[in-house]
Amino acid sequence: MELRKILEAVESGEISPEDAEKLINALDEFETFEEESMANGVFEIEDGEIFRKNLSVTNAKLSIKGDVYGNVSVVNSELEICGKIYGNLSCVRSRIIWNGGEVTGNFNAVMCNESGEPKVGGKRNIVSFNIPFFNKIISKNSFAFKGEDIDVKIISGKEKITELNHDKIVVDGELDAQSIKCEELVVNGKLNAKTIDCEELVISEDGIIRSEKISAEAISNKGVIESEKIKCEVLTNNGKIVSEKISLESLENSKDIENDILIVETLYNKGMIESKYLESEVIKNDGTIYADSFDYEVISGNSIIKKKGD
């Protein structure tokens, strides 16, 4: 919500001066807020909790009972609003339950189902498709929508694409692509791509990625990744990763990693890592690490095993 709209809303009595003050104080921060992703689970912003981040929700159930100072994006999810969102709410193919809560910014909804009494301080931009044939096409294949605060692509069926570039991409079906560029990529199905370049990559338990090169700021994996090269800042692995070379700043591993070269500044391992060459500054090893050769500055916990089976 712009400053002019906030003042107009106070003048018309739509929002209180106290809420306007909170919104104005937070307005400049929204653009610099970090974004947190929630996918494939049940989540809650508790009553009395203040959440100061932009929030992205995919294939999940979320109940907002506290205050969210940021923008909220919801795709293929169920959202219950009991508290306040001091930002914009954008929803695609989701169920929105208004349970006494409100949005002080704009509300953008594409192919959504609403229940309850909505309370929105900004604009309501609702896009719905009532043509049965069109709905069947969307449910079986893919869906893309780009508008104010929304740029999302959902792959529900099988699709081959040379280049894909959206803010958010959700792969629920099977996708073959040469190049993918996006801010957020969520994989619940199968993805084959030559190159993947994104800020945040989330792979669910049923998700599978096969790629030549993956570049990301943060990767959260519960499924399977097979990639020749993986480069990112933060990697959290609760699934399986097979790669030739992995370069990162921080790695938290609870399951299985097999690779030729692993270069990481900080490594926290509770699972199993098998590598031909491992280089790290700090290692905390509560699991098992096999390496043909390795170089580190500090290690705690279990020692690195020179060869598997020794």
Image: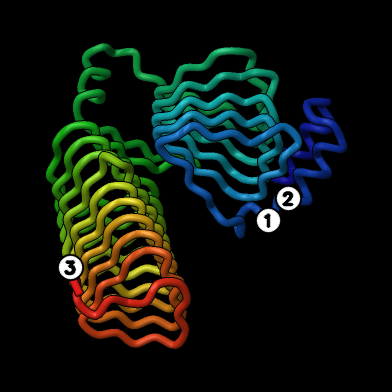
The amino acid at mark 3 is Glu
Q: Earlier in the sequence, mark 2 or mark 3?
A: 2
**Residue most extreme to the right:** 17
Q: Residue at x 16, y 64 (%)?
A: 212
Task: Say what secondary structure mark 3 lies in.
Answer: strand
- Residue at which label 2 appears: 26
Q: Is residue 121 visible?
A: no
The amino acid at mark 1 is Glu
- Residue at which label 1 appears: 29
Q: Residue at x 40, y 23 (%)?
A: 111
The amino acid at mark 2 is Ala
Rendered position, 114 above or below 209: above
Q: Is residue 228 left or right of residue 102?
A: left
Q: Quadrant of residue 153?
A: top left
Q: Quadrant of residue 269?
A: bottom left
Q: Are marks 1 and 2 in contact (CB under 8 Å)?
A: yes
- Residue at which label 3 appears: 228
